Image (spheres, rainbow, N blue to C red):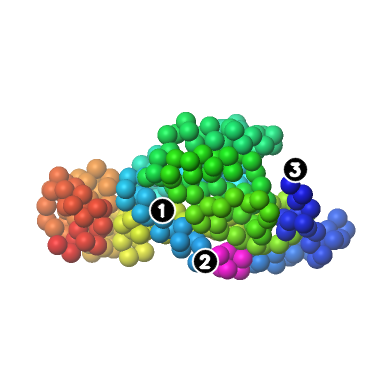
Amino acid sequence: MIDRSAFLTEQRLAESSGLDAMSATQIVALMNAQDRVAIDAVAMAQAEVVAAVEIIVERFARGGRLIYVGAGSSGRLGVLDASECPPTFRSDPQQVIGIVAGGEPAMFRAQEGAEDSFEDGAKQIASRQVSERDVVCGIAAGGTTPFVHGALAETKSRGAATLFITCVDPFEGEPEYDVTMRALVGPEVLTGSTRLKAGTATKLILNQLSTASMVRSGKCYQNLMVDVRASNAKLRDRATRLISTICDTAPDDSAALLAAADQHVKVAIVMHKRRCDRERALAILEATNGSLRRAIKG
């Protein structure tokens, strides 16, 4: 059993020692102040996050996957980030995957004991046939979750890349991974409750990993979400406006282009810019690995 008493996430925050006697105004103000600490902690890990992004982009180029693994709040944050990638970047739902200890039921109701199984973490990786093309990112705010380290150990044995997000300093016996990102946010307002600023820091890092990797993989143009999946009224409206912005077309013309492109913004833009039909636009995008900038330049 690891002695976790000295870990940052287990320490008491002096500023919140009288938490139970504070007013709602005081509690919220304190939490706001502490959340700013999370932002600074993530900034200190920038070099490691960049290194992780470079690995992810390289694996995506090889047809590989990004797989998040975590337990409790950490696992749910990974699933959340993964689930947002297909609608935001029109990515294959299997390109970014989230695994949470305890499976789908753990997304909605705590399954605290599930995190203690090193073997189950390994089995989750084996069942998904992880290979050297993939990258697995373990998430464990407190640093020691057996389920996560089991998953990463199996990942290493398969030659895949390993990333680790945590909110504690290195500890004796901590496994080595390709990149470890440490958001050292310190003690929580509510002692040990890492769903608070540790969770905030984790969410910020996940935002950076998926967004930067997708952007570097050609999933946006300028700062526009051109790979958005126009699957509802709001997103169809956004898609139409994107086409109008890039092509300088009237809203009705942009809507017609989107329909002709089977609701695919990039295809619609290439059709207009290169004055071609949908099939030709698809071929151009395939030849440029999905880069709109390169596709319309030709």
Instruction: Name the N-terminal-most of marks 2 and 1.
Output: 2
Please name the residue shown 61% across and 54% down the image: 166
- Tell me residue 72's x, y (percent): 64, 42
Q: Circle 2 is placed at which residue position?
A: 46
Mark 3 crowdedness (10 Å alpha carbons): few <14, some 14-19, many ≥20: few
Residue 42 image point, x, y percent? 58, 64
* Label 1, residues with CA under 10 Å away: few <14, some 14-19, many ≥20: many
Q: Earlier in the sequence, mark 3 or mark 1?
A: 3
Residue 16 placement: quadrant: bottom right
User: SS at mark 2?
Assistant: helix
Q: Which residue is mark 3?
A: 1
Please state which of residues 146 and 85 is positioned toward the viewer in this rendering: 146
Q: Residue at x 13, y 48 (%)?
A: 280
Look at label 3 and name its amino acid: Met
Amino acid on which disc 1 is placed:
Ile
Which percent across, then down, holds residue 65? 40, 44
Q: Which residue is mark 1?
A: 56
**Closer to viewer: mark 3 or mark 1:** 3
Q: Name the residue located 70 percent from the left edge and 67 percent from the top edge.
A: 33
Q: CA distance from mark 3 to mark 2?
A: 32 Å
Which quarter of the figure has residue 58? bottom left
- Distance of mark 3 from mark 1, alpha carbons? 33 Å
Q: Closest to the observer: 146 or 87?
A: 146
Which residue is painted at 21% across and 55% down in the image?
Answer: 288
Numbered range of the magenta stretch: 40-46
